[in-house]
Amino acid sequence: MLALARRGLTIRDAKEEILGLVADDYYKGPKKDFDSDRPGDIWEFKKEIAGIQFYVKIKIARENGEEILRCIGFHEDAFT
């Protein structure tokens, strides 16, 4: 949240950026996450937003028989 606020981005902005991820933004993954509550796959992306490189980490898991997407990281990329 702090990384977003520092750059004037809202949660809605972050959601739009996540939903707009494309293959060119791909960094690495999938990596299995064996979280006992919601096992799933972790994907990592790097995306330029307003001239700044951001690192985005998402998880796709199954919940109640449906796939859900959860953002688990969204901040400026420390390793650009």
Image (cartoon, rainbow, N blue to C red):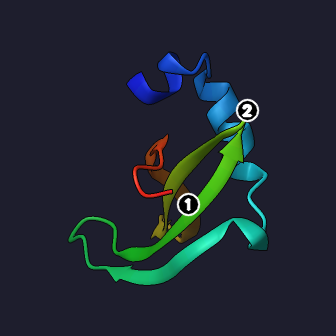
Give the class, few, some or many, for how many residues have Cα within 10 Å of label 1's Cα (few <14, many ≥20).
Answer: few
* Image position, residue 5 (x, y; %): 50, 17
Mark number displayed over residue 33? none
Cα–Cα gap, marks 1 and 2: 28 Å
Disc 1: which residue: 68
- SS class, disc 2: loop
- 34 to 49, vertically: above or below: below
Q: Is residue 75 visible?
A: yes
* Image position, residue 35 (x, y; %): 24, 70
Q: Closest to the observer: 49 or 43?
A: 49
Mark number displayed over residue 50? 2
Q: Residue at x 26, y 78 (%)?
A: 34
> How many discs mark residues in the rendered view?
2
Q: Is residue 34 left or right of residue 4?
A: left
Q: Is residue 4 left or right of residue 24?
A: left
- 60 to 49, vertically: above or below: below
Q: Closest to the observer: 78 or 11?
A: 78
Q: Residue at x 58, y 26 (%)?
A: 11
For discs 1 and 2, the disc positioned in front in the rendered view: 2
Query: Hey, which quadrant is residue 27 in on the image?
Result: bottom right
Q: Earlier in the sequence, mark 1 or mark 2?
A: 2
Amino acid of disc 2: Ala
- SS class, disc 1: strand
